[in-house]
Image (cartoon, rainbow, N blue to C red):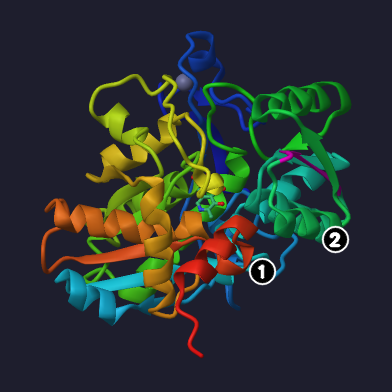
Amino acid sequence: MNRRVESAICIKCGAVLPVADYFCGCPHCLEKGENASVTLRYRGTPVLGSGRGMLRYGDYLPYQTFPTLGEGDTPTIPIPKLAQALGLDGVYSKNEFQNPTGSHKDRMNPLIVARALDLGCHTVAAASSGNEGVSLAAYAAAAGLECCIVSTSRINPVWKTAILAAGAKLVITDTAEERWVFLKEKVEKEGWYPATNFISPPVGSNYFGLQGYKTIAYELFETFGPQKMPDYILVTVSRGDLLYGIYEGFEDLKAAGQITALPKLVAVEPLPRIERVLAGEDYRSNFPGEYHLTESIGGGTVTYQSVLAVKNSGGFAVSLPQQEVLDNLLELSRCGLYLESSSALALGGLKKAVAAGQIPQGATALIVSTSGGTKNDPEICQEIIWQSKIAR
Ligand SMILES: Cc1ncc(COP(=O)(O)O)c(C=O)c1O
Ligand SMILES: [Zn+2]
């Protein structure tokens, strides 16, 4: 482990804890029914390494070296057509789908397998209906670890194939909740090392892994510099791991005096969840709604970390109905960006926020394009074909 790692700390109550695994988040908050994640504190000043990709930032992370597949260093591209249409000074995309297994999750899993190796665990596991499963299976294979992904029968065949091809075991349960029961038992009785948590309401995923998302903030800083950072960064949210990790990265940059203010983080969701919490509802409530076209960011729960990242950065949350998913996907595709439906929702969030005046004319905004269109569900692919004109 990186010698700079000093302690764990609860993101809600601030309790300073020994560096250990907290699969259910902060034990003090858990006792009070206030489920919340922990994060890591470091001592000293990090040193930037050489080469490319996430390994360069090893000194900023819990493990300086980890099994790598070449993650990180993803391109940031301008989308001038959208900037012009929306009256913004710039619209950009950080192409996280250009990571090795095609999603942002590839920044999290190298650190999770590094932790599992450090502890001597033989099996890593995750409850996942998609990108996390594919990514963890690949990193486990690279690290020589066993892997088990627990999913439901709704899993898309593209993901199912990639998980099985990597040699991981795929366990199918009837309901999403049963996945957590299965995972909890394997962790507690057989010493499996979990990437995702298994409590409800959930906390963030494995906190060692989550540190990897900070590198997105560092890379954006290198791309834009302190003066030209985008004003708004739009992130599609499920557990808010990505959102929170990016937030921490910017907090690091601020603490180091490299930026004076954080870009405002905008959580984009398929139904009002964080939006309702920001309007006063308890984050531990259940938020029913429809998300069948955006399974990767579905579910009816909110994590404390999502709310914290949005609030502390001065951002907000925006939700879009399922009817808008395909329009967003097609509009981005016609700018050259073919994304997974869940990922394309970020554009809907941007357009809605601009229309509502939450993002003012002349501002700059960046969407984090989390996953590529080749992973789209067959149902969505059919819809795309129907809606696209076939020239004869
Ligand atoms: C395509 C896509 N976008 C966004 C997310 C949101 O990630 P997080 O759980 O970090 O909020 C996920 C998570 O599975 C995803 O698959
Ligand atoms: Zn706590």
Whether 266 is drawn above or below 230: the answer is above
Residue 113 spot, x, y in % from top left: 75, 49
Amino acid at pointer 1: Pro
Q: Secondary structure at mark 2?
A: helix
Residue 167 spot, x, y in % from top left: 88, 55
- Horizontally, residue 226 falls left or right of residue 246, namely left
Residue at 38% of width from left, 38% of height from top? 271
**Residue 132 makes an appearance in the image:** yes
Which region is colored magenta? 146-153
**Residue 42 makes an appearance in the image:** no
Q: Main secondary structure of the magenta part?
A: strand
Residue 56 spot, x, y in % from top left: 57, 69
Mark 1: C-beta under 8 Å from nearest atom of ligand 1: no
Residue at 81% of width from left, 47% of height from top? 117
The residue beneath circle 1 is: 100
Q: Which mark is residue 165?
A: 2
Q: Furthest-top residue in view?
A: 32
Residue 71 spot, x, y in % from top left: 62, 67
